[in-house]
Image: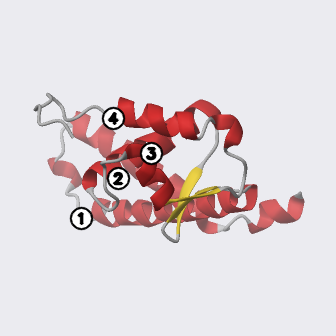
Amino acid sequence: MSTTIWRGGIPTDPDIRKLREKWPTASLTQGLVITDDEVAKVIAPVKPKTSRWRTVTDRWRRIVMRESGVIIGRIEGTYRVLTDAEKVELMRRKVRTSRTYGLAAIAIGTTVDLPSLTAEQRAMFDHQNNCAAAIKLSTATKGLEVAQDM
């Protein structure tokens, strides 16, 4: 690692480039497992379980997903190119998380003294409350009716 202090942190692009050269998009087939040891050899001297490691590997995974639609998940200490079934499970977990946060937002909203808000704050409150309610409503059925209609 360089001892140079970088404004905004040490750039991740060189490490991302190495990872993308080692695993180009065409080689990222569903079910492919990439171990920490394999990644460590590519981006050495970055060590696993450090904040730098997480910064580099998270950015690599986000870039691959954004540019090619390939999702590299973190499963049992390895990186795995998710199958379609695993993507559906990931979707389910994300929706569940959004529901949890939506319910928390609703609970917080019940504590707001509405008359004390300005018109702008009230508009923001109404918008956030409507968003949280929509999340709650959309997840209330757990997708059962939709699956039966297909």
Amino acid type shown at disc 4? Thr
Disc 3 to disc 2, C-alpha distance: 14 Å
Q: Position of residue 124 (x, y in %)?
A: 31, 40
Is residue 27 left or right of 4 when viewed as pictured?
A: right
Q: Position of residue 122 (x, y in %)?
A: 27, 42
Q: Quadrant of the C terminus?
A: bottom right
Choose top left, top right, bottom left or bottom right for residue 138. bottom right
Q: Which mark is residue 111?
A: 1
Q: Position of residue 139 (x, y in %)?
A: 60, 63
Q: Which mark is residue 42?
A: 3
Nearest the eye: 100 or 128: 100
Amino acid type shown at disc 3? Val
- Tag 2 or tag 4, which sits nearer the N-term? 4
Disc 4 to disc 1, C-alpha distance: 43 Å
- Tag 3 or tag 4, which sits nearer the N-term? 4
What residue did someone put label 2 on? 54
Q: Which mark is residue 12?
A: 4
Is residue 69 left or right of 66 when viewed as pictured?
A: right
